[in-house]
Image: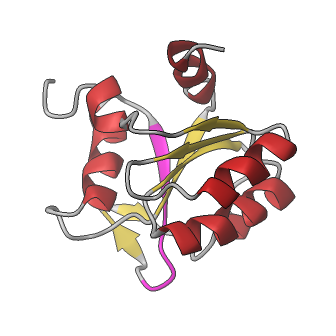
Amino acid sequence: MSVKQQVDTFLTSPVIGVVGASSNPGKFGNKVLRCYLENNRKVVPVHPKEAEIEGLSCVASVAELPDEVKSISVITPPQVTEKVVEMAATKGIENVWMQPGAESPAAVEFCREKGINVIYGGTCVLVELGFGNH
């Protein structure tokens, strides 16, 4: 699959989880969340300590995401990403988009072994969906 096909597959999820969502507008975890909102996507922020971000109720972990979430964007440190993808596989997540800086070779390999569509290597949701251009 080309990166474009991978992104198109990722975007078929009716709801997208944003793991590492942030309430700080300057952080990528907030920009990615707002980018999906700008593109009229339903999103669920994942943050262990926040109750609400950008007016949306948060869940504390991937395990708590609603079942209709088939895709997650990951904006976490690489060692956290490795734990996130394990939870994602258990949860039945089909698509994982590791934002630049979140990638881990072990996490990418894990996704491939589990048959998860994994997007990584510099492809950024903010560029692909055109953050701030709407």
Magenta span contains residue 38: no
Q: Is any part of residue 59 visible from this angle?
A: no
Q: Position of residue 50 (x, y in %)?
A: 40, 80
Residue plotted at (37% across, 30% down): 40
Q: Position of residue 94 (x, y in %)?
A: 75, 39
Q: Tell me if residue 134 comes above or below residue 32 in the rendering.
A: above
Q: Tell me if residue 124 comes above or below residue 128 in the rendering.
A: below
Quadrant holding the N terminus: top right
Q: Residue furthest bottom?
A: 49
Quadrant holding the C terminus: top left
Residue plotted at (60% across, 22% down): 6
Relative side of 100 to 81, left or right = left
- Which range is magenta? 42-49
Residue plotted at (55% across, 26% down): 11
Image quadrant in which you'd find residue 95: top right
Pick the front one: 73 or 67: 73
Image quadrant in which you'd find residue 114: top right
Secondary structure, magenta segment, majority class: strand
Q: Is any part of residue 92 visible from this angle?
A: yes
Image quadrant in which you'd find residue 83: bottom right
Q: Position of residue 123 (x, y in %)?
A: 40, 33
Residue plotted at (78% across, 41% down): 112
